[in-house]
Amino acid sequence: MEKRIKGSTKLLALFGSPVGHSGSPAMYNFSFRYHGLDYAYLAFDITKEQFPAAVDAVRLFQMRGFNVTMPDKNIAAELVDTLSPAARIIGAVNTVVNDDGHLTGYMTDGSGFVQNLKEHGVSVAGKKLVILGAGGAATAIQVECALQKAAAISIFNAPDPFLDRAKETAQKLKKEVPDCEVKVICLDEQDRLKEEIMTADILVNATRVGMKPDDQISPITDVSVFRPELVVADTVYEPLETKMMKDAKAAGCKKIIDGEGMLLWQGAVAYKLYTGLDMPVDAYQKYKNGQEA
């Protein structure tokens, strides 16, 4: 690393708290080396209270940009100069690009999800999706799928404050993307859930259900909803194969997509925003797995 850092090296970073576990520095720095770019990427533990000062530092140090993780995504949206359509609807950003002092905020979680589906030969255009959850990642997926011309989205969430958030998202999408029909239904209505999945093209789990240590739990208890033509996607990546995915496989679903790809591709979308280049995804995966890139 030190051999390629010079006086001209531009800095990018991850802001949030905690960030010590993040794999972003390894991914981005590998990609910079691969393309011979004069950039370096670091992670900084930044609280919500410190965030305005950190954004000032981005301008002062002429950083190329930064990624944002919890708990700073919403405040970041308030501090940038311009928001992408998805970021504006969501009210949060996870990627900021600095163009000569002008900061533009993006939300790449949804883009990463859509790209991950494309890598598996699945398009959301013209499709009906059932999306479980209304948290940050779920909202990003809902908004991006609507912007990518999904025909209909049925959002299911437990009877908690996030259900109201889902209703707010649906109202925004009704104005922004009127051609996409968006429904919000309480997850307690299991008959409605079955009915919606049976007429859906894509089922998405965007909740934490199925994540370790609760990896023996599935958000879908009635496995009769699984059928061969239903695309089943999970945003959980630990474990890589969730109980929902196992149940879908056992029922004969032909397209089952794990959450690791979404994580990778949202980073790749951000990389292209920073550099204008396609992230060397295949080379990085080989490097990560201990093979020659």
Image: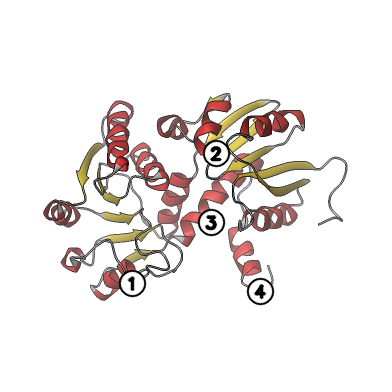
Among the two numbered marks 4 and 2 on one chain, the one whose residue lies closer to the N terminus: 2
Among the two numbered marks 3 and 2 on one chain, the one whose residue lies closer to the N terminus: 2
Residue located beneath label 2 in the image: 72
* Residue at horizontal 34 percent and vertical 60 percent from the top: 209
Residue located beneath label 1 in the image: 216
Q: Secondary structure at mark 4?
A: loop
Q: How is the image coloured?
A: secondary structure
| Image quadrant in which you'd find residue 273 | top right
> What is the C-alpha distance between the residues marked 3 and 2?
21 Å
Please, is residue 127 above or below residue 289 in the view? Answer: above
Q: Secondary structure at mark 1?
A: loop
Please name whichever residue, 12 or 112, is drawn nearer the observer in this view of the structure. Answer: 12
* Residue at horizontal 63 percent and vertical 62 percent from the top: 284
Q: Tell me which amino acid carries mark 2.
A: Asp
> What is the C-alpha distance between the residues marked 2 and 1?
31 Å
Per the rendering, the mark at residue 291 is: 4
* Quadrant (top left/top right/bottom left/bottom right) for the C terminus: bottom right
